[in-house]
Image (tube, helix red, strand yellow):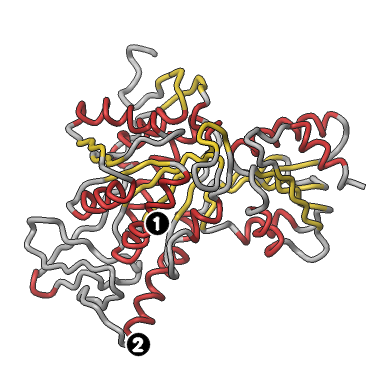
């Protein structure tokens, strides 16, 4: 690194994906981590345990995954940017408290490094079986944002963005990637974000006696009561009114739920991010995230060298799914190929959203091995004619 470079200049590092996740969290301002060791995410906890004390943060190993999610929520309600990380079985255990974070609008980040399942499954092997769970894992209608990085550098950047989105929108944000990406080591540039690139939550101001903890203006985001500032707030997992107290009044419940989920649509432009590769003239579109998306990029280069026009649509923001952007790119294509390391989850979105006349083909691998470029090349060629 140039000795005269600015303090926010990128630093070239040889680093693992899980370690980059931890560094991204700290760069974003995370100062509390609660977790429980679980393969293949344990390196995140190890890195946070080593690095958080250096910046005045707190690391705690909890008794289980349920307590880890609860402690993360508690720390956030206490005014601190907070995160937890896990894998399949642990992600399942976090779901009830994830719903509590959603209904209380508590900013927090949950990292899920996916492995084979169900149950204990294959702890050391990659999979993508949690795509739907990441969106619908907890009960009831609820808001959640899910980001799906596919490189080490993107893990770092999207972890930072996860905190920004969580703080700005008062919503739990899941960072979702598979074991291969988590354990991949790449040489990357990691830039320390400038203070103005980091988002802080909206704190309550004005007369204390007029404060309503769940009242929102046009942006649909209520201001939070900072502990110690004297603003009265009631926090409950029950459906509540603007005061924070439980209600079953149909009008109030409807207004609350409309705002709770509507705030994501209201800030759609802030949330959505996707990558397009050679889609303009493509005859066949590949829809993929994570390791299959990496394989797809190699497959596209090979296919185009042979004169076959293929392109990639990669949702970086997986949920809310970028429906309009996908429809626009899929229009006019002969087929959409969906390679995923499960028995068919992301393909369901493609089937629901694809324009009429566009064939949808799933390409699935669920034996604990990665989808290869050759598998995608074969699937594309079978759907070009």
Q: Is residue 188 left or right of residue 332?
A: left
Q: How far across and how far down the image is residue 266, in percent?
A: 44, 66
Q: Nearer the viewer, mark 2 or mark 1?
A: 1
Circle 1 SS class: helix
Identify the residue shown where x is 58% and y is 57%.
Answer: 322
Give neighbour class at mark 2: few <14, some 14-19, many 20+ (Cα, 10 Å). few
Q: Position of residue 143 (x, y in %)?
A: 42, 63
Q: Nearer the viewer, residue 336 or 36?
A: 36
Badge 2 vs badge 1, beta-carbon distance below 8 Å: no
Q: Which mark is residue 60?
A: none
Question: Which is more toward the observer, 5 or 374?
Answer: 374
- Residue 312 lies, with reference to residue 240, above or below; the image says above
Q: Looking at the rendering, which quadrant does residue 221 occupy? A: bottom left
| Residue farthest along the right direction in this orientation | 385
Can you identify the residue that label 1 sits on? 95
How many numbered discs? Answer: 2
Question: Which residue appears at 27% of the width and 52% of the height?
Answer: 70
Residue sitting at x 31%, y 40% = 35
Q: CA distance from mark 2 to mark 1?
A: 28 Å
Q: Quadrant of residue 261?
A: bottom left
Residue 106 percent coordinates (x, y): 29, 58
Name the N-terminal-most of marks 2 and 1: 1
Label 1 CA crowd tier, 10 Å (few <14, some 14–19, many 20+): many
Q: Which residue is mark 2?
A: 251
Extreme bottom residue here?
250
Residue 377: image location, x then y, percent: 80, 36
Above or below: residue 69 compared with residue 242: above
Q: Is residue 32 shown above or below 301?
A: below
Residue at horizontal 65 percent and vertical 33 percent from the top:
369
Local SS, label 2: helix
Q: Is residue 279 left or right of residue 201?
A: right
């Amino acid at each position: 690194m140039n000795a005269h470079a600015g303090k926010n200049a990128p630093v070239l590092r040889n680093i693992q994906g899980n370690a980059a996740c931890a560094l991204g969290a700290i760069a974003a301002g995370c100062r509390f981590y609660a977790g429980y060791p679980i393969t293949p995410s344990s390196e995140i906890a190890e890195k946070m345990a080593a690095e958080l004390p250096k910046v005045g943060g707190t690391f705690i190993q909890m008794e289980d995954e349920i307590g880890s999610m609860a402690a993360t929520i508690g720390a956030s309600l206490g005014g601190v940017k907070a995160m937890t990380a896990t894998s399949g079985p642990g992600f399942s255990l976090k779901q009830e408290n994830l719903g509590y974070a959603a209904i209380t609008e508590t900013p927090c980040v949950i990292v899920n490094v996916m492995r084979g399942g169900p149950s204990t499954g294959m702890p050391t092997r990659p999979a993508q079986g949690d795509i739907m769970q990441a969106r619908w894992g907890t009960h009831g209608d609820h808001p959640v944002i899910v980001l799906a990085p596919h490189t080490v550098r993107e893990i770092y950047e999207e972890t930072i963005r996860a905190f920004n989105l969580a703080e700005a929108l008062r919503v739990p944000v899941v960072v979702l990637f598979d074991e291969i990406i988590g354990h991949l080591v790449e040489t990357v540039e990691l830039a320390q974000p400038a203070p103005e690139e980091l988002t802080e939550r909206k704190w309550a101001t004005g007369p204390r006696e007029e404060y309503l903890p769940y009242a929102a203006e046009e942006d649909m985001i209520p201001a939070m009561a900072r502990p110690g500032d004297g603003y009265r707030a009631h926090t409950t997992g029950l459906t509540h009114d603007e005061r924070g107290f439980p209600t079953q009044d149909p009008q109030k419940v409807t207004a609350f739920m409309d705002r709770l989920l509507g705030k994501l649509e209201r800030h759609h432009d802030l949330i959505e991010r996707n990558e397009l590769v050679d889609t303009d003239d493509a005859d066949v579109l590949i829809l993929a995230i994570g390791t299959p998306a990496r394989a797809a990029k190699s497959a596209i280069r090979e296919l185009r060298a042979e004169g076959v026009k293929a392109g990639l649509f990669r949702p970086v923001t997986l949920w809310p799914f970028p429906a309009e952007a996908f429809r626009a790119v899929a229009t006019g294509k002969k087929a959409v190929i969906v390679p995923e390391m499960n028995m068919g989850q992301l393909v369901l979105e493609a089937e629901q959203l694809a324009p009429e006349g566009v064939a949808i083909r799933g390409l699935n691998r669920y034996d604990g091995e990665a989808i290869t470029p050759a598998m995608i090349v074969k699937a594309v060629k079978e759907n070009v004619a």
